[in-house]
Image: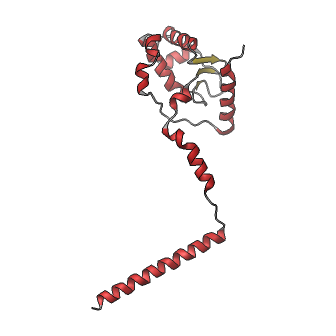
């Protein structure tokens, strides 16, 4: 049975294979985490495991948001529980609750945090399209134009230095 998240995961895997994934080395837990529904849907130990899964979703595997091995295969729950330093039962309980509310999806590629990109969206990400558009608008100069600009800069510097020397000479002779 195919799920809506299968196509999202496949797209992310294809992208990671073609250009590599961009890992940050950090994740964001916003203040809203304190009042999110996770606080009444999960027990305290499950919340702790879920927060570790968020970090693992950036650290494990080549796709941010997907906890997998480097070949895009699911890791055994026993191994994930060991990495999260928690009992397997707590991991399974947290996964069961997260899957029930569509915050996690699991398939043959691994454990996918369905809203990982939304939660990890930063001010840098927001500005990225504007930076790219600005970069595309920049004009590329030919080598001849660069030489002409350099020559004009050299002439301006020479005029500035000559005016400075003349000023120093006229103030020094008084």
State the scheme by which the image is colored. Answer: secondary structure
Outermost residue, left side: 174
> Residue drawn at (57%, 27%), measured in percent from left and top?
65
Please tell me whether residue 103 is drawn above or below residue 164 in the rendered image. above
Indicate the quadrant containing the C terminus: top left, top right, bottom left or bottom right.
Answer: bottom left
Q: Position of residue 130 (x, y in %)?
A: 56, 46
Horizontal arrangement in the rendering, residue 32 relative to residue 141 (left or right) = left
- When asked about the image quadrant of residue 111, the answer is top right
Please tell me whether residue 82 is drawn above or below residue 117 in the rendered image. above
Q: Position of residue 114 (x, y in %)?
A: 58, 22
Indicate the quadrant containing the N terminus: top left, top right, bottom left or bottom right.
Answer: top right
Q: Position of residue 122 (x, y in %)?
A: 50, 36
> Residue drawn at (34%, 85%), measured in percent from left and top?
168
> Residue drawn at (62%, 28%), measured in percent from left and top?
70
Horizontal arrangement in the rendering, residue 78 relative to residue 7 (left or right) = left
| Residue nearest the viewer, comparing 63 with 154 | 154
């Amino acid at each position: 049975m195919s799920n809506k998240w299968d196509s999202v995961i496949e797209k992310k895997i294809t992208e990671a294979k073609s250009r590599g994934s961009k890992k940050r080395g950090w994740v964001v837990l916003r203040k809203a985490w304190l009042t999110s529904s996770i606080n009444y849907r999960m027990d305290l130990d499950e919340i702790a495991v879920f927060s570790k899964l968020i970090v693992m979703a950036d650290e494990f595997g080549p796709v941010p948001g997907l906890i997998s091995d480097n070949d895009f295969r699911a890791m055994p729950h026993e191994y994930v529980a060991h990495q999260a330093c928690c009992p397997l039962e707590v991991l399974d309980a947290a996964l069961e609750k997260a899957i029930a509310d569509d915050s996690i999806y699991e398939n043959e590629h691994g454990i996918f945090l369905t809203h990982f990109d939304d939660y990890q969206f930063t001010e840098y990400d927001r500005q990225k399209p504007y930076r790219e558009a600005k970069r595309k608008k920049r004009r590329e100069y030919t080598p001849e134009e660069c030489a002409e600009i350099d020559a004009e800069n050299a002439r301006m510097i020479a005029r500035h230095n000559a005016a400075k020397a003349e000023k120093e000479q006229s103030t020094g002779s008084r």
